Image: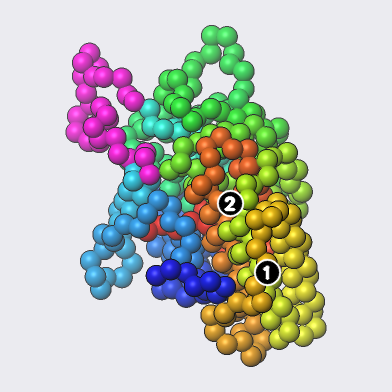
Amino acid sequence: MARPPHSIHDTTASPTSAVRSEHSSDGHWWQPGPSSSLAPAFVPSEVLAAAVGQTGVRDMIGRMPSDAPPGRGRPSRRTILGAAARVSGAAGIGLLSGCGIRFGGPDPDPRTARPRQRVPDEQVLLTAFHDASRLARGAAALAPATDLTRRLDALHRTQSLVLRDALRRAGVPDQVVTATVPTPGATPTPGATPTPGGTPAPGSTPSSSASGPSRSSPPTTPAQLAAAEASALTSPALDVLARTTTPHRPTLTAVAACRAAATTALGSTVTWPASDALPAAETLTLLDATRAVAYGFEIVAAHLQGAARAGALTTLQQVRQRESALVTTAAAAAPPEPLGYDLPFPVTTADEARRLAIVVLTGLVARGLDPLTTLPIGSRAIGAVVRLQAEAITLGTPWGVAVTPFPGMTYP
């Protein structure tokens, strides 16, 4: 069904909305149910349900039928991980069974086996996997532990598990997946062993090294953790992101935005490198979503009192500043602001106003990756997409919008 013009849709009403609304009492960051620590070998269904994001946001690749028989309860680990891997496979890292990669059975005879063909963006995906693992270890090791560090641990563990399983099911050997990845962009030492897997595939140009701890060692202080999170936001790193292939760019962009929001949550300021402005066409989808939030928060503020109303007015001011910047970017292509938007439900009480705040801010994150649909590969405007999505995440956290491992995407 086509999206009606000038309507606000409740994307939080889904079978997993109860899980997604389990944000912490302070209204900040994602918490995966009763435990914030994820065992590497098992991801509870409620964790992946929270990681899904809200219904209606961008699928990681496309929806897949469930493996679970109808009427059953929590799906098995094989069902969940199989679905996640098939999603990535449909995107281009799993459809390699006819390219000389073996998915089972005895090892091939090395005398007759053909060289393994690298997966598109393999090096970038491997780096994202190792970064997520290292960030999770760093967040888990910080003392004293806080709600934020526990949630960051859970977020990055989920990212790591999904990326690791997808790479393995694509046929990337375990010894390559688990090998230490050298700092991308670093000048190779003469005589050094090449990066596992051989020559990087097209679209996998590495980024520059990050300051602080090496990629092989986890950060040990909050400041180091913030710096490690922000290492995905350097100009070279964003250039790498811009050159990734279409199937993987949304996933990696979502991870970068999540890390930018984590940097802010840790109390650090992100220094955004210069990037190209979004083209007018890609700006318009974000402008429409931003105007819907502004309209919604005018209603929210009207139904709240005291400190809650002051908070709503602060958010409204931030959203209006975002809208003004997008109008400037779109220039003559920007349409006049609609007189109003259809609401997803009547708002007459303070509780309904708070619910509307969550709905509109969730919708802002849900549409944050829309520009990637038409943004050309290699465009340096990718930095603007990451920045705007990170800002949308940060706008939502005080209102209880859950932060997910892949903001703006869903699992099938």
Where's residue 408, x and y in %? 53, 57
The image quarter in which residue 175 lies: top left
Where's residue 351, x and y in %? 63, 85
- Can the viewer see residue 301? yes
Residue extending furthest toward the bottom: 348
Q: Amino acid at mark 1?
A: Glu
Q: Residues within 10 Å of mark 1 (few under 14, many from 20)?
A: few
- Can the viewer see residue 84? no
Q: Which residues are magenta?
A: 91-117
Report the Cα–Cα distance between label 1 and label 2.
17 Å
Residue at mark 1:
337
Looking at the image, which residue is at 71% across and 78% down? 298
State whether residue 273 is above or below residue 42: above
Q: Nearer the viewer, residue 21 or 62?
A: 62
Q: Which image quarter is the N terminus in?
A: bottom left
Viewer-nearest of discs 1 and 2 = 1
Q: Secondary structure at mark 2?
A: helix
Describe residue 219's horizontal placement relative to residue 172 as left or right.
Answer: right
Where's residue 409, x and y in %? 48, 56
Residue at mark 2:
282
Q: Nearer the viewer, residue 173 or 150?
A: 173
Looking at the image, which residue is at 69% across and 81% down? 299
Looking at the image, which residue is at 48% across and 22% down? 195
Q: Nearer the viewer, residue 341 or 338?
A: 338
Q: Which image quarter is the C terminus in?
A: bottom left
The image quarter in which residue 382 lies: top right
